[in-house]
Image: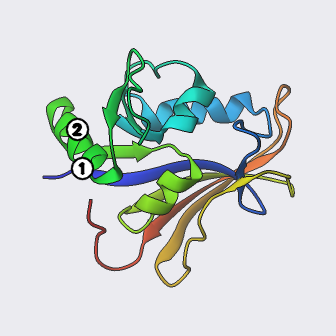
Amino acid sequence: MSASLVLVVAMAENGVIGAAGAMPWHIPSDLKRFKALTVGKPVIMGRKTWEAIGRPLVDRDNIVVTRQAGFSPQGAIIAGDIDHALIMAQALAEGRGCREIAVIGGGEIYAQTIGRASRIAMTIVHGQIAGDTAFPEADPSLWQEVSREACPRGEKDSHATSFVVMERRGAAART
């Protein structure tokens, strides 16, 4: 059985996911959710996302997609393209006995994988936030909202959020 692909994303109401190589908000309560959604799974990210995080994510196989020759940070598995990343992630998921592979950004990686994903786990950051990177539009004819949870702004959070899960309509996506 192959692992399904889930996109894990935090985005503003206007689709923004990043600004100048960073997230344009500070929401520690959502980082806890992110960890819960990704621990124990292979995670796929682009080089810029890896650099923004600045370290390997603990208890996850960190697969970094990059075309940059010679890029080989400690704690990361390098893939030259998304297809190789998905092949590696499937093998790692099988070895871990997990049923999901998490795609965690950035914009280019989401755009390359949204057509292959079976689920999107998104935190909607309430507000119209300026930024230079956006999440690709999820075609409503292909995606169906299956759950939504309002998350009030926590003491250390810059914004209130909602946690929304979308599932692909009809046939399963391919990885």
| Residue that numbered label 1 is attached to | 3
Q: Evaluate if marks 1 and 2 touch, with contact meaning CB atoms under 8 Å apart.
A: yes
Regarding mark 1 in the picture, which secondary structure is present there? loop
Which residue is at the front of the view, 39 or 15?
15
Please report the residue visible at 71 percent of the width from the left and 61 percent of the height from the top. Answer: 15
- Report the disc number at residue 93: 2
Q: Residue furthest front?
A: 69
Please report the residue visible at 50 percent of the width from the left and 43 percent of the height from the top. Answer: 104
Would residue 167 appear left or right of 79 to someone viewing this image? Answer: right
* Precedes in sequence: disc 1 or disc 2: 1
Please report the residue visible at 58 percent of the width from the left and 20 percent of the height from the top. Answer: 54
Would residue 135 appear left or right of 24 to someone viewing this image? Answer: left
Q: Position of residue 23 (x, y in %)?
A: 72, 38
Which residue type does callout 2 highlight? Answer: Ala
- Residue 99 visible: no
Which residue is at the front of the view, 6 or 23?
23
Which residue is at the front of the view, 68 or 127?
68
User: What is the quadrant of residue 167 in the picture?
Assistant: bottom left
User: Is residue 143 placed above or below 112 in the rendered structure?
Assistant: below
Label 1: few (<14), some (14–19) or many (≥20) C-alpha neighbours in 10 Å: many
Q: Position of residue 36 (x, y in %)?
A: 49, 32
* Structural distance between the alpha carbons of marks 1 and 2: 7 Å
Would residue 152 appear left or right of 37 to someone viewing this image? Answer: right
Regarding mark 2 in the picture, which secondary structure is present there? helix
Would residue 150 appear left or right of 145 to someone viewing this image? Answer: right
